[in-house]
Amino acid sequence: MSQSPTTRPEIAAGTLIDNRYIIQKLLGQGGLGRTYLAFDTRRFNEACVLKEFAPIGTGESGLEQYRNLFKREAKILHQLQHPQIPKFLACFEGDNRLFLVQEYVDGKTYSRLLGELQRQGRNFSEDEVIQWLNNLLPVLEYVHQHNIIHRDISPDNIMLPDGKDLPVLIDFGVGKQIADINEGRSSNHQVTFVGKMSLVGKVGYAPREQISLGLCSPSSDIYALGVTAIVLLTGRDPSLLMDQYSLEWNWRYYVYVTDELAQILDCMLADRPNNRYQTAREVLKDLEGIGESEVAMSPAIIRDDLPPTIFNPEFQAMSAILQSYNQPQETIFSSAGSPTSPQTGRIEQQRQPSLQPAFIKSCQQGLAYHIGPMANLIIEEILAQNPYISPDQFIELIAREIPDFQAAFEFKKTLFP
């Protein structure tokens, strides 16, 4: 009896596949198989990605069904010709294994880029995320027009190639086809149920209908893109941005953005698919004009159902000190720490003064109440990295150091009544 694909071991480095591709290393593996970095010996050892398709739990009885799906989707992926999608190069079967070959993107994932920014003391700014959305939504529009849904959008599956400005959507692996999977469905029906093959996607990023029911539509990708956007803005995992009891998004507690962008993101993140944007074009249309008109930053959401603040007396002075500032609260900082205009991105000519010592001392005492002696070191590091930070942004950064969400919320509520 021939061996099932799922019982076959990882392909060793140096192995020659199809008398052409030399395996270099394993890039990753998941429920649908493994991904390798390989060199194409017939293209001057050009780097490429070799994807071995071997769904977990696939036995001999189901192999033929998956082989047909594999070939059908490979044909569709071959039709995708977009500069922000890795090129589909080949597909073949060898030694009872199914393989896809795609262009190798040399760059960094947005998960890694976010980590690099956080080590500099910041996350992606509103302007950066708006530009990022404007760059990616046309890619989604193109993909959806070809009756394909990505279904696994996350910071790990979006890359910025070295030396390039436009992000690239990666990991168009097997199992993402939606067009005409089920016989008898009309060609214009957007939502398709494809059984267990639909149950892909990262928990926290995939919408409920995809994870629970295996249902997907273009709005499923829009949801995942919205989750990725708020992760880039807040620097937090999706599980920390959703209320564990109501399952409602509370990402606005962690970042200030314009009301226009906040409303767009909330619409992308709607739990019910019919309340969500249905097409990428709709999102792009609503993004137009953001930055063209001056708008106030959206205030923190104040809930009345939380218990009263339990802080030491020093906190009472903090709010008064904060209110004494007449500084604009929209300043966004570049990576170098220079204040920039949220609309133009240009460096402001006049810098804001440093925070008042009494205010800083009160913040240190308040933070120490929650995390102990490390508060002083954290405060010093934030100030060193952001010497011209405004009071509200300072409070936002130090509140992120409080591990308990409710305590962090009350900390900010005391300062922003």
Image (tube, helix red, strand yellow):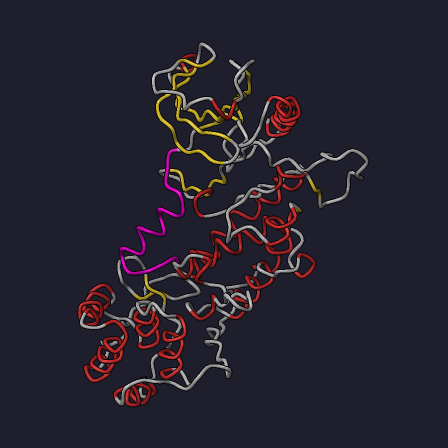
Question: Where is residue 383 shown, x and y percent of the image?
Answer: 22, 69
| Residue 120 magenta | yes
The residue at the point 22 percent across, 80 percent down is 365
Query: In the rendered image of this protein, does residue 412 appear above or below residue 195?
Result: below
Q: Is residue 265 left or right of residue 165?
A: right
Q: Nearer the viewer, residue 238 or 74?
A: 238
Identified at 66% across, 60% down, the residue is 272
Give the image location of residue 49, x and y in percent.
44, 26
For the record, the magenta segment spans 106-124
Residue 76: quadrant of the picture: top right
Seen at 43% across and 29% down, the residue is: 104
Residue extending furthest front? 1
Q: Is residue 48 above or below residue 402?
A: above
Residue 53 magenta:
no
Residue 29 in percent (x, y) is at: 44, 33
Q: Quadrant of residue 149?
A: top right
Q: Nearer the viewer, residue 379 or 175?
A: 175
Q: Is residue 323 above or below residue 226?
A: below
| Number of numbered markers | 0
Which image quadrant: the C terminus?
bottom left
State which quarter of the image contains the N terminus.
top right
Point out residue 157 in the picture as x, y percentages from the top left corner.
46, 42
Q: Between residues 148 and 198, which one lies in front from this camera angle? A: 198
274 on left or right of 334: right
Q: Is residue 129 left or right of residue 215?
A: left
Task: Tell me: residue 374, above or below residue 164.
Answer: below
Q: Nearer the viewer, residue 116 or 412?
A: 412
Residue 71 placement: quadrant: top right
